[in-house]
C-alpha cells in the first residue's frame, strides 16, 4: 500500500506496529517526520508535511495504542 501524508490513520497504525516500545507523546516532530518518511510504502513529497499533519499523526497514534 502506498502511503501519503494525508493517510494519517494508516500511518499511525504502521508506526504503532513497527515501534510498539515508543511513547508517541514523547516524540519530537523532526523524529516523527523522519519515521513516517522511512515507512515501507511511503511515497510523498517531504515538503507537503507540516506541523498540523504531524500533530494529527501523533494524535492518531496515541488513539491507536489506547
Image (cartoon, grey):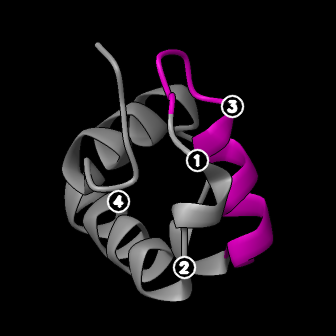
Q: Mark 3, mark 4: which one is toward the viewer?
A: 3
For the residue labelled by badge 4, is the local secondary structure a helix, a strand or a loop?
helix
- Compared with 34, 66 (above or below) is below
**Residue 54 image offset from top left, x and y in percent:** 49, 73
For discs 2 and 3, the disc positioned in front in the rendered view:
2
Assign a secondary structure to mark 2. Answer: loop
N-term mark: 2 or 4: 2
- Read off the magenta span: 27-43
Q: Name the residue under label 2.
A: 50
Residue 3: percent from left, percent from top: 36, 31
Q: Which residue is drawn at 50% across and 28% down?
A: 42
Q: Name the residue under label 4.
A: 61
Mark found first going from the N terminus, 2 or 1? 1
Q: Which quadrant is the N terminus positioned in?
A: top left
Residue at x 38% of width, y 65% of height: 57
Q: Residues at badges 4 and 1 in contact (C-beta under 8 Å)? A: no
Q: Residue 33 location, x and y as percent?
A: 66, 59
User: Between disc 3 and disc 4, whose residue precedes?
Assistant: 3
Q: In this view, does 2 lie above or below 33?
A: above
Q: Residue 45 carries which label?
A: 1
Q: Nearer the viewer, residue 48 or 30?
A: 48
Distance from disc 3 to disc 4, alpha carbons, whole Å, reads: 16 Å
Q: Is residue 39 part of the magenta span, yes or no?
A: yes
Q: Nearer the viewer, mark 2 or mark 4?
A: 2
Residues tagged 2 and 3 counted as in contact (Cβ below 8 A): no
Question: Mark 2, mark 1: which one is toward the viewer?
Answer: 1
Residue 21 x/y as whole percent: 61, 44
**Which numbered disc flags the more N-terminal residue, 4 or 1?**
1
Whole-angstrom CA distance, mark 2 to mark 1, is 11 Å
Q: Name the residue under label 3.
A: 38
**How many marks do you count on the picture?**
4
What whole-number distance in Å separates the C-alpha atoms at marks 4 and 1?
21 Å
Amino acid at each position: 500500500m502506498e502511503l501519503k501524508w494525508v493517510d494519517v490513520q494508516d500511518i499511525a497504525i504502521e508506526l504503532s506496529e513497527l515501534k510498539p516500545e515508543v511513547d508517541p507523546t514523547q516524540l519530537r516532530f523532526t523524529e516523527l517526520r523522519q519515521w513516517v518518511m522511512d515507512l515501507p510504502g511511503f511515497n510523498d513529497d517531504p515538503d507537503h508535511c507540516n506541523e498540523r499533519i504531524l500533530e494529527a499523526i501523533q494524535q492518531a497514534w496515541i488513539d491507536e495504542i489506547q
